[in-house]
Image (cartoon, rainbow, N blue to C red):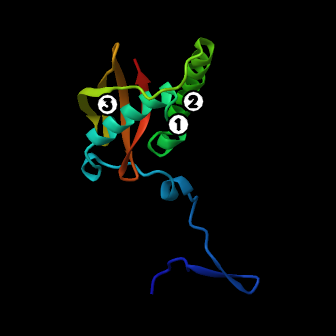
Amino acid sequence: MSDARPALALVDGTAARAPRGRFDADEWFGHQHSTTDELPDPRPLLENLTRSVIEILAGARELEQIARWVDDRVYKHLLKRVVLSTRARQMRGAKATRPAVTIGSVVICHPADGVVEATVVVLGRGRARAVAFRLEGLDRRWRATAIHVL
């Protein structure tokens, strides 16, 4: 018979669990990082996010529609950009319209396991723009941790 500590101890006549150490809730219930093998191909998400971000900045789509694919810092950053572009449109007296864009080249690199950095070229009527992304694998899906429209 071993001298191991009992799982249950009597405290004031009632059974109570013996303390086991500090419990870290984030370790069990927070976001879990995923490896690249556990994640889907990032290209469709990059193309859809690019189109959505351009439409959000043009005022043709609501920011809340992409909230599940971006982290809080990206959401706040895009919200500031939306406010600024809305004010600029109001000053010019222009209406929000859906921009006619096509997705050009998509360049993807993998700097670390479960991380993608990409640049997507967007071709519009009057100009070409680039959108830079950083995607990280969390809970077996991609999540944008940085988005910059150039």
Residue 144 image position (x, y, % from top left) = 42, 37
Tell me: 11 left or right of 100.
right
In the image, residue 128 above or below residue 101? above
Along the polypeptide, which appears first: circle 2 or circle 1? 1
Describe residue 57's horizontal placement relative to residue 13 as left or right: left
Query: Which residue lies at the image location 38% right of the left edge and 36% below the top edge?
Result: 49
Query: In which quadrant of the rendered image does the N terminus lie?
Result: bottom left
Tags 1 and 3 in contact by the CB under 8 Å rule? no
Point out the tag, 1 or 3, that comes first from the N-terminus: 1
Q: Quadrant of residue 135?
A: top left
**Count of marks, rendered view:** 3
Q: Residue at x 29, y 27 (%)?
A: 102
| Front residue (pair 15, 130) | 130
Q: Secondary structure at mark 3?
A: strand
Query: What residue is pinned by disc 3?
Result: 117
Contact (Cβ within 8 Å) of mark 2 with mark 1:
yes
- The quadrant of the image that shows the C terminus is top left
Left or right: 42 in relation to 19? left
- Location of residue 101 with respect to 18 vertically, above or below: above
Q: Secondary structure at mark 2?
A: helix
Q: Alpha carbon of mark 2 to alpha carbon of mark 3: how far?
A: 22 Å
Q: CA distance from mark 2 to mark 1?
A: 7 Å
Q: Earlier in the sequence, mark 2 or mark 3?
A: 2
**Where does residue 7 sit, x and y in percent of width and height?**
55, 79
Residue type at numbered disc 1: Leu
Q: CA distance from mark 1 to mark 3?
A: 22 Å
Q: Is residue 70 visible?
A: yes
* Residue 81 at x, y percent in the picture: 54, 23
